[in-house]
Image (tube, rainbow, N blue to C red):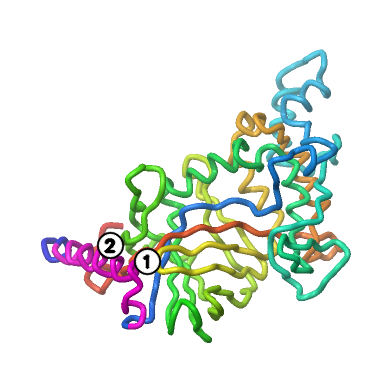
Amino acid sequence: MRHVTNKLAALAVTSLMASVALADGSGSIADTRTIGYVTTDLHWAFHQTQDVDKDCPEGLAGYGPRETFKELYPNGGPVEKTQLARESLKFFPTDKPMQFPYIFSKERIGVGVNLDGKVGPNDFVSATGEQGIDNALQKVLACNAQFRRPEGQLQLFGNKFVRTSTWNRTLIEITNVDSLTRSDNVAVTIYRGRDPVLLDATGEGVAPGGTQRVDMRWGKPIIQHLKGKIVDGVLTTEPIKAGIYPWAIYNDVPTLLNWRDMRLKLTLTPERANGLIAGYMDVESYYTWLIAWSTHHLSYGRLDPAEFYWALRKMADAYPNEKGEMTAISSALTLDMVQAFITHPDADEQKLSDAKH
């Protein structure tokens, strides 16, 4: 046991030295050809200004759980046929069709990437003029108060869990790095970390340079390998057919987002990585993620889960099933990370971990 403790202490010292070297731009990457990052922030990506009336001239989505309940049951009634009936629809939304109008965003400026390599009539244009941006999820989210910054409840508290939930301790490790400016052939691996993030002096931000031990037991299911390149300081990866990214948004409920054709696009520095996860989000996976958030909290942003499910289905634009119904929706997440020194367990540590579990 003392052997393992001493080894962890040595790793902490090594981590500090490595992170300082990375932060000041010295030769650590050149020596190891490796850099790691830990997730600090996640937000669903869509174009938003501070002018709600301009973004959403029809207003924000107005039918949340309270509003739908009041309209459906103006005179109340037995709990079984009112409250419980509506709450059960949260978990079985296909039991009834869409019953209330939903406000979809009509904004043409979008955030995301060109997933299919085409420019279509329903695609967005980025703020910098890039054509063919695929992000149908933006149409569902951009006029829903739950997701708008800064006051949206889900985007605010869901993001707080990224830093505090052990389930959300997601890492990326980039190897075969020639430099953070240009590397023609890098390998990117997604891991789950075991350690708290290193907070800065404010207690709110996350500082670069912390240590993250890779979870090779409970984190094995999320280990994924991607190929990519770095050009002008931007990492882009080739899509993987089936990707996952952990994001618990309520009391560590262990939720996974399931992507089709998932890829990363991140601007890299020695201290941080900022950019996007993009792909086609499986609709059922997204809905499972959403309803981890309690009905009580969904009410704050007037988001009725069953109605929201049908809005997702209406805008889904990829991967048709045998009935021709689209099962996935083009989407993107903004991803913010800070540099972390990632350590892998040696044989002795792995045996000790396995013995404990």
- Quarter occupied by residue 330: bottom right
Foreground residue among 133 and 171: 133
Image position of 97 with respect to 331: above or below: above
Q: Quadrant of the C terminus?
A: bottom left
Magenta extent: 6-30
Residue farthest along the right direction in this orientation: 121
Secondary structure of residue under mark 1: loop
User: Residue 14 magenta-drawn?
Assistant: yes
* Residue at which label 1 appears: 216
* Residue at which label 2 appears: 353
Image position of 311 with respect to 214: above or below: above
Measured as percent of width and height from the top left, residue 300 is found at 65, 29
Q: Residue at x 43, y 71 (%)?
A: 173
Relative side of 253 to 277, left or right: left
- The amino acid on which the numbered mark 2 sits, given as a three-letter code, is Ser
Label 2: few (<14), some or many (≥20) within 10 Å?
some
Label 1: few (<14), some or many (≥20) within 10 Å?
some
Relative side of 33 to 68, left or right: left
